[in-house]
Amino acid sequence: MKRLLLAAILAAALPHLAWAEDPIKIGYAISKTGPFAPAAQTQLNAYQLWADKVAAEGGIDVGGVKRPVQFVVYDDQSDFGKEPAIYEKLITSDKVDLLLAPWGTPFHFSIVGILEKYHFPVVGNSAASTTIRDVKPGNIWFTTSAIPDHLASELVKMMKSAGVKTVAINTLQLPFSQEFKKFLMPAIEKDGGFKVVVNEEYAPDTKDMTATLTKIKQAAPDAILSLSYPPDSVLFMKQERELGVNSPFQLVLIGPTDNFFSKIFGSNLDGIITMGHWSPAQAKWPKAKPFYDAYFKKFNEPPDYLDSALAWMSIEVLEQAVKKVGLDKDKLRQEIATDTFDTINGPVKFNGVENVTTPTMYLQFQKGEAQIIWPASEETAKVIKKPAWSQN
């Protein structure tokens, strides 16, 4: 009789015990191969660092109950056309409980329809465009504050503050650079205090910028703006150095925060300004330096101050929401849309799909470290003039 009673008690308890220990399935796709793989790596690293953290903590807190995590990961092969099918498979076949975002703006936009179809919430990260404001609020949010119209207006304010009068612009013919320029030129013209002395564009497969850089050198502008992506940012800076093209104010839009830039350019990176809104040196963000330290310990290199930070922010938002309301999609959607979240970049709150609490900022490399130099309310260092290129 006692055995039967014990068996009945165990049978009643087992379903609950199994539920408490069932793993949470978390899925995502990212560019592990193809042309975008090098740029996506720092975001992937952030995801892998979080997987280690969750494992070390005994799982993810789901409404007050720790659950182990199982990741389902696909390589999108740098083809955003594959992304909708992959995310639909994650939702319908793999039956994941949560989703993380892919890398890059077009990849984010490619899955919006799938998320709407299945009412599946995702916190995005490495995507920036004014068109995010056209996305119907409900199932995706964007943690970045680096939106082209805001970036353009803040750049003009920063150049004016630095005493810039003449400007040379070299623009990559890809969407983000073009969108940035679309807002930059009217902002420059509206201010009226600048003269654009060189205004060139180039194709993504460009291998030589000598002609444009020679024009820029002859014009000797106060500011040089390279509206570029990582591969052509390297080309631009290398050929600038070779030709001795100097300017006290130099912006290289995307790339310098990637760790391989410091390996290529060393001290020549100092003085370069780039987009970004995070730094471990910002003391009022207490979670920033621990993230930097953990990332460096695992990968033996600094995180990308743009994509690594954005990826981690998106995880923090999702993790805090799941801890509070669990896995119910309607509750998650409501929580993410209305609450304020504590992140390595300070508090984050969304208005529609847009992060409205993180200011638009710029970084500058100084003594090998990326410092926030704009706006003054967020700065970790004052802006410096770009030193002349060293040939060492």
Image (cartoon, rainbow, N blue to C red):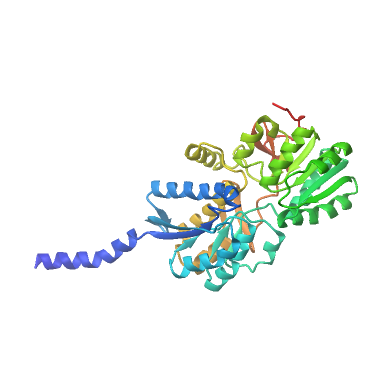
| Residue 26 position (above or below residue 213) | below
Specify the quadrant of the image occupied by residue 9. Answer: bottom left
Q: Residue at the spot x=76%, y=37% of the render? A: 240
Q: Quadrant of residue 102?
A: bottom right
Residue 51, position as x, y percentages in the image: 44, 50
128 or 33: nearer the eye? 33
Q: Quadrant of the C terminus?
A: top right
Residue at the limit of the structure toward the left, as seen here: 1
Picture coordinates of residue 356 (x, y %)?
66, 56
Compare residues 231 and 47 and report the one nearer the observer: 231
Please state the total of marks drawn on the protein image: 0
Q: Quadrant of the N terminus?
A: bottom left
Q: Residue furthest top?
A: 392
Tell me where residue 106 appears, x and y as whole percent.
64, 60
Who's the residue at 49% across and 55% down the image? 319
Q: Nearer the viewer, residue 47 or 323?
A: 47
Q: Is residue 172 visible?
A: yes
Q: Residue at x 76, y 45 (%)?
A: 226
Q: Is residue 162 left or right of residue 366?
A: right
Answer above or below: position of 314 versus 222.
Answer: below
Closer to the camera in the image, 173 or 360: 173
- Left or right: 302, with 256 as reference point: left
Residue 17 left/right relative to 37 = left
From the top left corner, tell me how far across and down residue 97 is, in percent: 44, 64
Q: Is residue 282 visible?
A: no
